[in-house]
Amino acid sequence: MSFGFFRALTQPRPAPVEEREHVVAGRTLPLRIVENERARRLTLRIDAGGQGLRITVPPGLRRGEVERFLDRHQGWLEQRLAKVPDRPQVRPGISIPIRGVPHLVVHEPGKRGTVALSQDESGPLLIVHGDRLHLPRRVADFLKREAKREIEALVVRHTEKVGRKAKAIRYRDTTSRWGSCTSDGNLSFSWRIMMAPRPVINYLVAHEVAHLREMNHGPKFWKLCKELCPDTDRCKDWLKRNGSALQAIRFE
C-alpha cells in the first residue's frame, strides 16, 4: 500500500530515522519516518496486518512537509485500515487455521505445557495444556515446530530439483515478507505460513528455492518457480488476498 508525491526543494535535513505514533480513526499506530538518499518523493506504507505505518522521505525534507502529507492522506489511511482485519489475540475459544484448516483453541491445564491436534464432533481442535498465561506463546512455538518439520522437507525436495543446496534455513516472525533468500544461499521463512493451506506453503518454499538459481523476479525465475510449483499463480494470489489476516493474529 503506498501513496506518494514529488519532492519539493526544502531544508533543513531531518534525522535519518524518527519513531513516533500517529492516530488514525481512533487507532494509535507506531510511525517510522525513514530518510533515504535515493528517494525522490514521500512514500507512505501500511505494515502487514495494519500494525504500523512507515514514511520514506528524501534527504533534506522539512518535517512540516511530512505533517501536511499525513494530513492529506488521512482519508486514504482510514479507508485502507478499515479493510485490514481485526487483530485477534490467540486465546481459548477462537479458531486459528493450521495448514488452512480452522482449529478451535481449547485450553486444558491438566498436562504440562504440551500442544496437540485433536478432533471432536464440532471439528478440528488445537488443545493447549499448561498455564493459561503461556497459551499464546505455546501455540506460536507449536507453529514454529511444524514449520521446521514441513518446510525443511520441502526445501530438500525442491533443492534437489534445482541442483542447488541451501546453506541455512531460518524461521522468523516477519511482517514485511513471507520468505527470503540471500545470495550466499540462506533461506528464511515466516513460521506464520503454517496457517496457510498446504499448497501455499509449498509455493512459498518453491519461490525461495528458485532464488537459489535466479536472484531476481524475471521471466526465468517465474518459469522455474512454476516448474517447482505448477499452482504458483493461484497460491501467489491466495497469499496476496489472505496474508494480512494471518499477519494480524497476535501471539504475544
Image: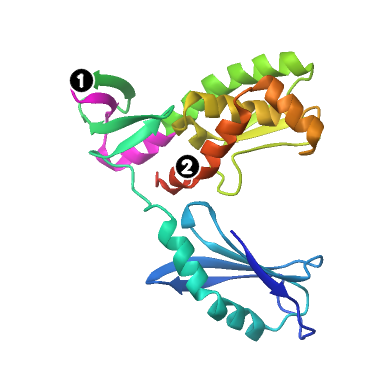
* 58 vs 147, nearest the viewer: 58
Picture layout, residue 169 above or below residue 85:
above
Which kind of residue does numbered mark 2 sit on? Asn
Q: Position of residue 108 (x, y in %)?
A: 21, 29
Task: Report how far apart the C-alphas of labels 1 and 2 lie in the structure.
Answer: 27 Å
Decide which of tag 1 and tag 2 comes sooner along the chain. Answer: 1
Residue assigned mark 2? 242
Which kind of residue does numbered mark 1 sit on? Asp
Q: Which element carries disc 2, helix, strand or loop? A: helix
Horizontally, residue 223 falls left or right of residue 101, namely right
Q: Position of residue 40 (x, y in %)?
A: 78, 70
Q: Position of residue 70 (x, y in %)?
A: 56, 77
Question: Range of the magenta residues?
Answer: 121-140
Total numbered badges shown on the rendered structure: 2
Q: Position of residue 198 (x, y in %)?
A: 49, 24
Give residue 53's quadrant in the image.
Answer: bottom right
Horizontally, residue 32 falls left or right of residue 9, namely left
Picture layout, residue 32 above or below residue 116:
below
Horizontally, residue 218 falls left or right of residue 1, namely right
- Image mark for residue 99: none
Residue 128 is a magenta residue: yes
Horizontally, residue 12 falls left or right of residue 100, namely right
* 110 vs 84, nearest the viewer: 84
Residue at position x 77%, y 28% in the image: 212
Q: Is residue 6 visible?
A: yes
Q: Dot 1 surroundings within 10 Å: few (below 14), some, or many (20 or more)?
A: few
- Image mark for residue 120: 1
Residue 187 is a magenta residue: no
